[in-house]
Amino acid sequence: MFLEMGYFIYNQRTKMGLEKFLGAFRSAPQILEGIKNSVFKKEHIEAEAALRWSMCRECPSLDTEGKKCFAPGTQPCCGECGCSLGFKTRSLASSCPLGKWKAIMDEETEHKLKNSINYEN
C-alpha cells in the first residue's frame, strides 16, 4: 500500500513536470518575448504587466516559493502553467491559463506588426 501510494505520487509529479515542460516548449516564443520585454522595457508593456500582475497577486495559484515553477529560481510563477510571472505578464501574446487576463494579440499578428514597422523604417 505504502509503495503503491509513493509510486502514484511519483507518477503524478513526473506527469506534472512533463506537462509543464511540454507547455514551456510550446510557449517558447512567448517566453522569449517576455524576457526581451523585461530587458528592453517599454512604457505600454510595463503598464500591461502591472495590470496583469495585480490580478496574479490575488490568485490562489500564485507560487511565491517556486515549488511549481518550471524553471527553478524564477518565482513568483503561475502554479497552473509554471511560467515565471515576471516574463509571462510582459508577453503580449500570452494569456492567463485560468482566463483572468487575455493575450492582447496573437503571435502571428504581432509578427506581422513587427515586420510592417521594420519594413517602413
Image: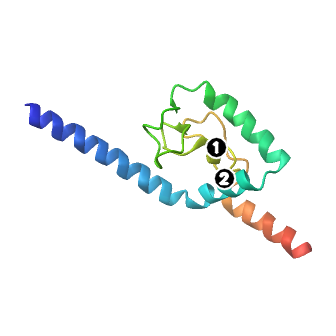
Q: How far apart are marks 1 and 2 (CA)?
A: 8 Å
Q: Where is residue 34 in the image (x, y as percent from the top left)?
A: 66, 53
The image shows a total of numbered marks equal to: 2
Q: Where is residue 13 in the image (x, y as percent from the top left)?
A: 30, 42
> Circle 1 sits in a helix, a strand or a loop, which is it?
helix
Q: Is mark 2 on a helix, strand or loop?
A: helix
**For mark 1, what is the residue?**
86
Q: Residue at x 48, y 60 (%)?
A: 25
Outermost residue toward the left?
1
Image spot of residue 22 (x, y percent): 43, 56
Mark on residue 74? none
Q: Which residue lies furthest to the front in this view?
A: 73
Residue 52: give x, y in percent of width and height.
69, 36
Point 28% across, 41% down: residue: 12
Quarter of the image holding residue 1? top left
Residue at the farthest right position: 121
Position of residue 66 relative to residue 40, above or below, is above
In the rendered view, tell whether residue 121 sits above or below residue 107: below
Q: Residue at x 62, y 27 (%)?
A: 57
Frontmost residue, 53 versus 19: 53
Give the residue drawn at x 82%, y 50%.
42
In the image, what residue type sits under mark 2? Gly
Position of the C terminus, as image quadrant, is bottom right
Crowding at mark 2 (Cα within 10 Å: few <14, some 14-19, many 20+): many
Q: Mark 2 points at which residue?
A: 34
